[in-house]
Amino acid sequence: MKATALTGRTLATAGLLALGLGVAAAGTARASSASGAGTATGWIRLAHLSPNTPAVDVYLYSFGDSSAMIVLRHVSYGTVSPYEQVAAGDYSVAMRAAGASASSPAVLSTAVDIAAGHAYTVAGLGPESGLRLAVLDDQLTTPPGQALVRVIEASLVQRVATVTFDGVTIARKLGFGSVSSYQPVTPASGTIAVTDGSGHVTAEVSLKADTVHTIVVLDGTNGLETVDLLDAAGNTADPLGGVATGFGGTAPRGPSSPVPWLVAIAAGLSLALTAGLRLRRLSRA
């Protein structure tokens, strides 16, 4: 009988301990999340849009820190990363040949000042011989009920492109390596057409109300291609994703999920309840 009673008390103690640990850890997770939410942040994404430049490794550094906080490996032409949320402040982006040592001199670098609530695309543009890193200020909201569209001309074959949406001109005679301004358009599902020069390509896109798009003109394996990047939607001031790759290396992570601690709390409650019922039965006996 004593051994049974001792087992019941042990279960009760273990249950209360698990419950206490779960509550404490959940509180810590909530505090961490609240602390992170109060930090002023912006967004950045990285793109390789130079047709005759080989794959590169791309690094993002916080200003004054020699340790890269984000690294993308073997980024090839046509790749646009998803946005990554970072604290507002000064950063630098560096490109190195794919596989080169992180301590080797950068082939190309540029500074980026990330303002709170703003999003940026840092893109490698132009031919290999004249490669440059362009910092693009990305729009996140639209005029009410409208869509916004801009064009990045990244085709070395086309070199000059006029881009229309259902006959409405979005960019006229845009030169290779150039970026147009955002143009408001009436929301609809329709045809993006690229003309001028020797190339011609069309693609069906859906431009919904309160969405922001970047159309990228690329050299594909079978001729011209277009990629529709949905930069933002819903006028929430939060950007969306990219294409073809994601962040690697030491990409920062958001606050940890409270779910594991909620599971621990539930387990503690269950254990404590079971032990309590067993002790009650023993006392009656």
Image: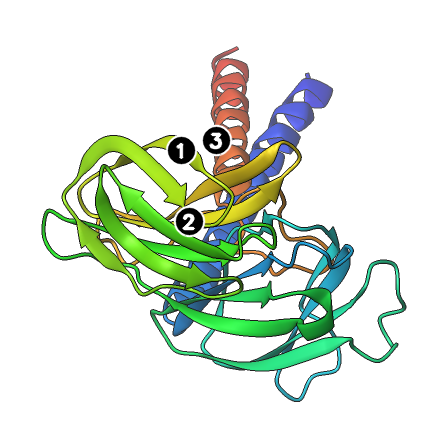
Amino acid at circle 1: Thr
Q: Are marks 1 and 2 in contact (CB under 8 Å)?
A: no
Q: Is mark 2 on a helix, strand or loop?
A: loop
Label 3 belongs to which residue? 266
Q: Is mark 1 on a helix, strand or loop?
A: strand
> Where is 213 relative to 47, above or below?
above
The residue shown at (44%, 59%) is 33
Dot 1: few (<14), some (14–19), or many (≥20) neighbours within 10 Å? Answer: some
- The Cα atoms of the two marked residues, 2 and 3, are separated by 65 Å
State the residue lying farthest toward the bottom. Answer: 64
Which mark identifies residue 196? 2
> Where is 253 relative to 37, above or below?
above
Q: Where residue 55 sits in the image (x, y, percent)? A: 77, 54
Q: Where residue 49 sits in the image (x, y, percent)? A: 60, 57
Numbered disc in front, either 1 or 2: 2
The residue shown at (33%, 69%) is 117
Which mark identifies residue 202? 1
> Where is 126 relative to 160, above or below?
below
Q: Do the residues labelled 2 and 3 touch (CB within 8 Å)?
A: no
The mark tally for this picture is 3
